[in-house]
Image (cartoon, rainbow, N blue to C red):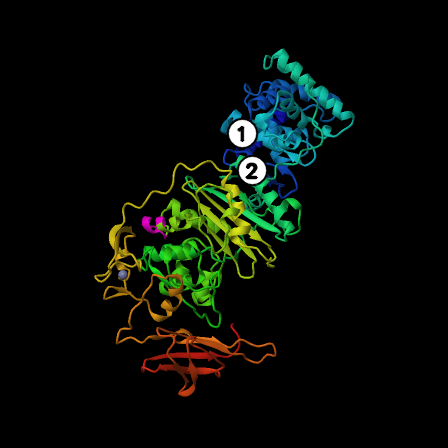
């Protein structure tokens, strides 16, 4: 009998040893699904999503707050900080009680053993309790008491689908565990003991009594004083669970699932921006603009500090949960500053260089400026500030579509998925799509200058931001609409068909991006970047603290003389010069081509449109070797499409010629055939056949102009 008992003991010892060696998983709760939890920069909860198994189970924390720790140790396991994982006294007491009762009645488990039980989820038998005891001893060897308590708090059941202290604290009290009162901490300490008692009914009274008994014990133990105790027992139990915070919804949806993510959001600003954009969204909805997205970046840290993926989500509109701030939208003019800055940086132009503003044909499409006027020649900075389309097209032709495509990609725009040729020159007029978050980040990059940022020339960036800080926007904006006095470098964009309204602005400390429109893509009459998105942009800027200053004037660039009239580098024949600090590669830009013999003379087509805006312009006698005639339309080697008429037959195009001596007669010839003669206004309406053609004009003095073009089949692709 004695021998048999000894063998049994040996076997038991062997099993326990094996359990000791192999039983404990390295990560106790491996495979447990957790809620997605997203916080602001200081750890405040922005929002959370339920775990894959439908439980509100927040990812584990490393520590638990003091009050809860005190309460739960007092309630569950008074000798927690003294025992090695197992408390032999209470275990023996429990064993005796259970044997008497004939089934498992009393726990006798330490918090450490409960951690093991929560991780294994086995039925409660004496045998399982033995395993738990062994593994608890082992757990104590490799984890601190603090960590074990945190593991318990993170995985204990709190009734319904609420698991863990964090989720329980938010669901029952609408607060993080660190802000719980003694009564609340005590409630959550006793709740896992009877998780269903939070529901209304008789068991709720039991819960209240249990809580108050614990509070009494805490007082007796000296953890709280009498006043605190009396206040605490007067507190009622919580009612219906609170909804969790739901800020920056679309940003929360984008975070990795099942983990806790700390974002750069400033929860106070986020709340203010959401109130503001909700209000704007309601107002814009009345004029048919359903969707609004906005974001704010702190340029000193690079963090997005407020993010509204779609303000209309607060109206619970179907589809409004889509994050518009991260969706590709047609860009309008919002990319123009990057072209301007790129062209300044590589010496293609100076800030003052006159850009051509004469008709241009893009495969049958003739872009127009906002005011439907051509100005002949406009300084580059003014063309940017006024967001003129035609000079931008001429500038892109100069800079090169593939280079600009590559620049935009390097700036972080992920949406230019097609080859440069697909976009062509329309790339600068909204032919491509971009995301508000990426566009805003690219604007921010000009200020922040992160490592490897492609627009890095300090002077080029300064001139770009300076051009955008002007309030004179006659093209798009009635400046009186904007009530802010704050100085901001900003740009707007309006897509073709009034589908998208953009406004992006930067100051030394902040970048703000706003997009308005309809996510489903239908246009709204009167929607423009300046009128629709602009006021929202400035309202958001007004929420932000004052900037510490403004962008500092350029200091490190090269110094050169610039021709006052043409804005090019001054040549020997330029009469008026001004000394300027310019981007490093400015000397590679062309010398003034317009001063001849000290006189400012533009080419005929530019002159034709320039003269009405510039009464001081005199021009000159035509040099002997240069024709006074120049085609405005078509451009050399242009590909033209005849507009289709109502009945489906091809219509005609108007050919346009500039002459320095408009009163003189001009004779027109197409492919050698005489067409007719024009005076004063040199236009000819023609419908040439499909294929290549030569158009020749000649005047009485024998001056000629010649243009080769091709009529293409069909309509603009
Ligand atoms: Zn000059």
Residue 87: within the magenta?
no
Q: Is residue 693 visible?
A: yes
Task: Measure the C-alpha gap from mark 1 to mark 2.
Answer: 47 Å
Q: Nearer the viewer, residue 420 or 290?
A: 290
* Image location (x, y in percent) of residue 678: 42, 80
Q: Secondary structure at mark 1?
A: helix
Tell me which residue sits at (47%, 62%) in the image: 369
Residue 617, disc: none
Residue 459: within the magenta?
yes
Q: Secondary structure at mark 2?
A: helix
Quarter, ligand 1: bottom left
Q: Is residue 13 visible?
A: no
* Image location (x, y in percent) of residue 311: 60, 46
Residue lying furthest right:
202
Residue lying furthest bottom:
673
Q: Residues within 10 Å of mark 1 (few under 14, many from 20)?
A: many
What residue would you read off at disc 2?
272
Q: Is residue 687 above or below residue 266?
A: below
Tell me which residue sits at (68%, 31%) in the image: 124
Of tags 1 and 2, the one toward the viewer is 2
Tell me which residue sits at (34%, 52%) in the image: 460
**Which span of residues is magenta-colored?**
454-462
* Image location (x, y in percent) of residue 679: 42, 78
What residue would you read off at disc 1?
139
Q: Nearer the viewer, residue 3 or 156?
A: 156
Q: Is residue 397 above or below residue 253?
A: below
**Total numbered labels placed on residues in the image:** 2
């Amino acid at each position: 009998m004695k021998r048999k008992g000894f063998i049994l003991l040996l076997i038991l010892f062997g099993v326990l040893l094996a359990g000791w060696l192999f039983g404990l998983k390295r990560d106790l709760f491996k495979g447990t699904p957790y809620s997605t939890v997203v916080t602001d920069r200081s750890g405040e909860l922005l929002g959370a999503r339920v775990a894959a198994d439908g439980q509100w189970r927040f990812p584990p924390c490393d520590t638990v707050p003091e009050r809860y720790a005190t309460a739960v140790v007092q309630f569950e396991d008074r000798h927690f900080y003294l025992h090695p994982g197992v408390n032999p006294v209470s275990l023996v007491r429990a064993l005796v009680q259970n044997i008497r009762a004939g089934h498992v009645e009393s726990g006798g488990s330490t918090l450490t053993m409960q951690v093991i039980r929560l991780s294994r989820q086995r039925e409660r038998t004496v045998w399982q309790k033995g395993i738990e005891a062994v593994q608890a001893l082992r757990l104590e060897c490799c984890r601190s008491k603090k960590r074990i308590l945190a593991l318990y708090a993170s995985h204990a059941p709190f009734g319904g689908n609420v698991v863990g202290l964090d989720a329980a604290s938010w669901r029952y009290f609408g607060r993080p565990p660190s802000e719980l009162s003694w009564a609340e901490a005590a409630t959550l300490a006793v709740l896992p003991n009877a998780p269903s008692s939070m529901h209304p009914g008789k068991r709720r009274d039991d819960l209240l009594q249990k809580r108050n008994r614990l509070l009494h014990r805490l007082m007796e133990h000296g953890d709280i004083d009498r006043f605190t105790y009396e206040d605490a027992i007067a507190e009622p139990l919580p009612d219906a669970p609170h909804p969790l915070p739901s800020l920056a919804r679309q940003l929360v949806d984008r975070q990795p699932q099942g983990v806790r993510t700390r974002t750069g959001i400033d929860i106070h600003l986020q709340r203010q921006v959401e109130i503001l954009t909700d209000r704007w969204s309601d107002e814009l909805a009345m004029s048919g603009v359903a969707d609004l997205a906005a974001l704010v970046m702190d340029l000193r840290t690079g963090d997005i500090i407020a993010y509204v993926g779609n303000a209309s989500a607060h109206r619970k509109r179907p589809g409004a949960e889509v994050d518009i701030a991260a969706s590709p939208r047609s860009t309008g003019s919002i990319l123009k500053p990057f072209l301007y800055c790129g062209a300044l940086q590589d010496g293609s132009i100076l800030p003052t260089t006159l850009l051509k503003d004469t008709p241009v044909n893009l495969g049958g499409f003739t872009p127009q400026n906002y005011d439907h006027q051509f100005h002949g020649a406009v300084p580059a900075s003014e063309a940017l500030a006024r967001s003129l389309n035609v000079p931008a097209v001429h500038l892109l032709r100069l800079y090169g579509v593939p280079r600009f495509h590559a620049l935009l990609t390097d700036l972080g725009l992920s949406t230019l998925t097609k080859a440069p040729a697909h976009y062509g020159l329309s790339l600068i007029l909204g032919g491509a799509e971009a995301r508000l978050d990426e566009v805003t980040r690219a604007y921010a990059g000009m200020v922040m200058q992160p490592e490897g940022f492609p627009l890095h020339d300090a002077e080029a960036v300064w001139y770009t931001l300076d051009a955008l800080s002007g309030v004179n926007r006659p093209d798009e904006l009635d400046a009186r609409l904007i009530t802010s006095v704050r100085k901001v470098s900003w740009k707007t964009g309006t897509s073709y068909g009034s589908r998208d309204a953009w406004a992006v602005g930067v100051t030394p400390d902040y970048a703000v991006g706003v997009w308005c429109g309809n996510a489903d893509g239908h246009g709204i009459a009167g929607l423009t970047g300046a009128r629709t998105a602009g006021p929202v942009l400035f309202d958001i800027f007004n929420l932000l603290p004052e900037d510490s200053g403004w962008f500092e004037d350029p200091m490190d660039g090269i110094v050169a003389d610039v021709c006052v009239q043409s804005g090019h580098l001054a040549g020997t024949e330029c009469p008026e010069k001004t000394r300027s600090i310019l981007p490093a590669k400015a000397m590679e830009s062309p010398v003034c081509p317009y001063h001849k013999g000290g006189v400012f003379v533009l080419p005929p087509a530019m002159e034709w449109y320039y003269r009405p805006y510039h009464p001081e312009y005199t021009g000159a006698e035509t040099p002997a070797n240069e024709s006074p005639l120049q085609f405005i339309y078509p451009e050399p080697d242009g590909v033209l499409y005849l507009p289709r008429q109502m009945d489906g037959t091809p219509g005609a195009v108007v050919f346009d010629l500039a002459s320095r001596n408009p009163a003189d007669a001009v004779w027109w010839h197409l492919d050698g055939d005489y067409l007719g003669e024009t005076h004063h206004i040199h236009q000819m309406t023609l419908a040439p056949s499909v294929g290549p053609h030569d158009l020749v004009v000649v005047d009485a003095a024998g001056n000629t102009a010649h243009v080769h073009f091709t009529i293409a089949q069909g309509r603009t692709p």
